[in-house]
Amino acid sequence: MMTDRFQSLGPVFFLLQTGTSLSQISGHIFRLALAWWCLQETNSAVAFSSLIAFSVAAEVYLKPFLASLGDQFNRVKFIFICQIIILAIMSLFCLAGVGGEFHLAAVTVGLISMSAVIAVREPTIMGLIPDLVGEGYVSMAISRRSAINSVIMLTGPVIAATLISFVSIGFALFTAALLQSSSALTFLRLMGKGSLTASAICEHESWFSKTRGGFTAMYRVKPELHIAIISALINFTMFPFFSVTIPYWISTELHLSASYLGAYEFSFALGLLTGSLYLNTLLQSCIGRFWNVVTGFLLLGCSVIGTVLAPTIYLSIGLAFFSGLAFIFINVNLSTLRATATPGNYRTRMSAMAAFLSSLANPFGVIIAGWYMHWLGVIPFAVLSGIAVILVAPILLWSWHLKNALSLEEVEMQGYYAKTYPDAFTERG
């Protein structure tokens, strides 16, 4: 059934998602195996957390400065090269594992290098989707992509933990490299389908000019600017809520085992999957894309508040499902607008700029959340976070730029930004 749904979008999109999915599973296995290896060798939480922090920071902060590469070259070939580079790095780690050579500095450099490649690969994939599916099918493609990513979110860590626990870290690393090589071969097959897309960026433009053009476009396209500001405000509270507050609350406040955290994450991923496959499309057909997004913010805020105020942990776990639904209502519709309305030679940059600006405050949010939970407690902090999300709804109603754009049918969105904000895409030397 799932395969039929992807095949209905065309064989080239099916190949794209197959290659992406293999790479994502590989990433889950590789990162968990590497993290376990690091903990075994160093026995230091500080070394482990620093390793992750450097990796995440590289992926977030390098996005806008590398994004123009994805708009400059044939996107399929560029993604293939990214996959080969990641495979090469994974292979080096495999060899180091076989030789029993662990050097924290080398591991850190390797992870930062991988993160830099991923920082430009992911926006390039999002920019490629409109080139691979028919007009009016971008929203469906992004929904199907979210659905399969949700399944990977559910199964990836389980596969990784099983390989590490029942076989070995080295075997897990080799499995990750094998899956990554399969992903690269899939993109090689996709390249054989022909020159699907090539950028219209002039070769004489400098990297600085192209990067500046991405920032300029984000600033002048008002719907995207408003989305970026709103996303940054939401992620400032929601990123620490899901990554820090919930684990801390379940472990320290409720004194429950990690299995409850796993159940919470499973319920959240199930919400992502259900929203991707069915409910987002159903709700959009009933109330439209704009009100779908508004509903998502209201549902997310209420679910966050209800999670910590629920009388039992089982109800809190159930509310995680609605948090997952809310994320789909928000992300799929906003991503569809961005991918469809942005000119082809700016898609990767626009996607990267949006990801960069929306996650810019995440590290600071985590630090501040820790202090707030220390002084206020978990429940007051979570309630304030939920209220902050709910208050986004009036901001959406205030932004007529965003309301107009999200009120369009998907076919009407095609090229909307270029028509409405032509100065945003005028290159200046």
Image (spheres, helix red, strand yellow):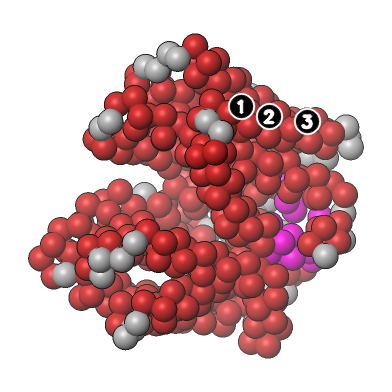
Q: Residue at x 30, y 38 (%)?
A: 49
* Residue corresponding to mark 2: 178
**Front position among marks 3 and 1:** 1
Q: Main secondary structure of the magenta part?
A: helix
Q: Residue at x 10, y 65 (%)?
A: 375
- Residue type of the residue flagged with mark 2: Leu
Q: Secondary structure at mark 2?
A: helix
**Upstream in sequence: badge 3 or badge 2:** 2
Asked if the residues shown at circle 3 and circle 1 are in contact, with their CB atoms under 8 angstroms apart, the answer is no
- Residue 186 position, x and y percent, is 79, 36
Callout 2 environment at 10 Å: few (<14), some (14 to 19), or many (20+)?
Answer: some
Comparing 295 with 379, the one in front is 379
* Residue corresponding to mark 3: 185
- Residue 159 position, x and y percent, is 59, 46
Report the disc number at residue 174.
1
Asked if the residues shown at circle 1 and circle 2 are in contact, with their CB atoms under 8 angstroms apart, the answer is yes
- Residue type of the residue flagged with mark 3: Leu
Apparent side of residue 3 relative to residue 410 in the rendered image (left or right): right
As measured in the structure, the alpha-carbon distance from the residue carrying label 1 to the one carrying label 2 is 6 Å
